[in-house]
Image (cartoon, rainbow, N blue to C red):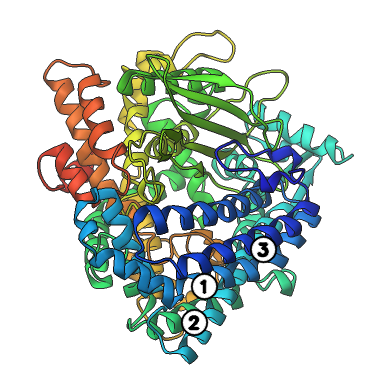
Amino acid sequence: MSNPLLDLTGKLPDYPSVKPTHINPALDTLLASSAAAVTAAEQAQNPSWESFVEPLDEALNKLGLAWGVVAHLESVVTTPELRDVYNANIARISNFYTELGQNERLYAQYKLIAASAEFATYNSAKKTIIEDTLRDFRLSGAELPEAQKQRFAEISEELSELTVKFGQNVMDATDEWALYIEDLAELDGLPQDWLSAAKSAAEADDKTGYKVTLKQPSQSPVMQFCSNRSLREKVYHANVTRAAEFGPAERDNGPLISRIHALRSEAAQLLGFNNYGEESLATKMADTPAQVAEFLRNLGHGAKPFAAQDRAELKAFAKEHLGLDTLAVWDYGYAAEKLSEAKYAFSAQEVKAYFTEDAVLAGLFKVIETLYSLRFIKAEAPVWHPDVNYYALQNMDGSAVGGLYLDLYARTGKQGGAWMNDVLSRSRKGASQQNPVALVVCNFARGVDGKPALLTHDDVITLFHEFGHALHHLLTEVDESGVSGINGVEWDAVELPSQFMENFCWEWQVLPDLTRHVDSGEPLPRALFDKMLAAKNFMSGSGMVRQVLLSLFDMGLHANADVIDAAAHNAALVAEFETPVAPDYNRWYNTFSHIFAGGYAAGYYSYKWAEVLSADAYSAFEEAAAAGQAILDPVTGARFRAEILAKGGSRPAIDSFIAFRGRKPEVAALLRHNGLN
């Protein structure tokens, strides 16, 4: 068992011991054992949960765990050697799972279980797994004629390779761009912590001056605070031309977008759908692309007048106070920050000084502990990078709940953005229970000059968001791994717990425990919080329209089987919602990894769909507070844990929502929270 990828069942992965040379031998072994398990399952007589489902899942889980570790390492600590061996194995992993999904003998075995008398005695989780598995066989082409099965398999293999390539192109294009600036005057307006980090980054490259990159902690402050308009334009140009035809041809995601779309459309039509949008919604709460589009347009056109007011106010302010007769797209962030400072008499940098990393984590843990009677305890575990910490999660009586890895900082070789993923899922076999483990990855700026990392308030919201996902996985009480935690949850409901957690970042009862000034150690003053609250919905109309546009770009693309010109499609949406027109060279969609390299294809609308659910769910806590309870009401928290978080995918998300709220969701809370009612 010297290969760490062959020793994963029921234990934490030995991340630092995994080398590229381990991957091929491990996959050879695991693919062979998985194939043997499939053969045995095909031949099982009188298949049942115990004789068929459990042993097959156990064998396949070993392969899934190993490949999950490899994929995770490739996303957070990639090297040329790791990437090469990862890419070389994408096709055979894809082929194995495609063949598995099209296996008629296994499909027939699951049908026998569903038709058996024993099926009626299964609990809801087991029934859901069987029903979802039958659906997934159909969506994997199990009912297709042989020739079409072969074509479906070819499409699946190519899509796996292209979507991975898309994400790698974004990472490489982001990592490769840098600008070194010698003259400090060119960086006027940028905060001291940014300057210190940029100077350290330049020194690490044996350069003088200050290093500007396209990593979020570097480029975002430039666009928000730097008074140097020319520099803002340079950074904007570099950011929106990443992975496009302006760079190396092998890193251009434009052709990949067209090919991915064409392949998804072809596969969907093989399965009997008109387009990929319809196929995607077969596993979601929403019914049709038209229903999604109507939902989005209702939100977008409702917010459109507010967005127009935002732009008019911003242009007038920029002309009068910033000397900008014309507001270019690279001016919006800077002008919005200046307008916010003028209107609300505080700056984002002033707020940031209070959100020290250690205080934020302590406050976040306190929120979770108060709501759900839990505690986080820092523990030892093998980690993939020195930045990473591991925490054991326990109930207050000391009983184990699960574990969480936390990887906060941006670095070279790490994909941008923030995400949660599962490491282990809760399951039970006899008296043996496996507790869930999750990981949270962010890309914040690390501390400089011996000081703790400082988070923006947006960073804090992001962290709470990802912890909401993690809690959804960790607090499950379902013992069947296929629907425990986040597994089996409809994609357009999976954002409910994450967006729900964001609300606590705006509560005065919470903020003092989240904050400690980097110099004085004082918590956030109430007067500053009141200013933040007054500014909470600043430009919210524009923000709503932007998210609607992204969602309609996604669904409009995938709900049309014909080839769509991405630039023209985007231009039509810009015209419909009258958002600022970007320069012709803008290729923002070439880095839209959510839909071209992630799981959000024909599903980006889920953020807004689930925000209706999350805002309405949070209203229960607001109602408790209005009735004299604390906003962190343990009684309401216990109900949310029991009815939303604990159930995982064992029942439809709408049933879980109704069980918690006592009724169907209403959109009023979302509009109120955004100041759009």
Look at the picture and state if 631 lies above or below 438: above
Sequence order check, earlier mark of 1 and 3:
1
Give the residue drawn at x 48%, y 49%. 332
Quadrant (top left, top right, bottom left, bottom right) of the N terminus: top right
The x, y position of residue 473, in whole percent, is 41, 40
The residue indicated by pointer 2 is 152
Q: Is residue 516 visible in this depiction of the protein?
A: yes
The mark lying in front, picked from 2 and 1, is: 1
Query: Pointers 2 and 1 in contact (CB under 8 A)?
Result: yes
Spatial CA distance of label 1 from label 3 is: 25 Å
Q: Amino acid at mark 1?
A: Thr
* Amino acid marked by disc 3: Asn
Question: Which mark is drawn over residue 169?
Answer: 3
Q: Nearer the viewer, mark 1 or mark 3?
A: 1
Residue 226, quarter of the rendered image: top right
Circle 1 crowding by C-alpha within 10 Å: few under 14, some 14–19, many from 20: many
Q: Earlier in the sequence, mark 3 or mark 2?
A: 2
Between 179 and 265, the residue placed more toward the observer is: 265
Query: Would you name the residue on which mark 1 appears?
Result: 98
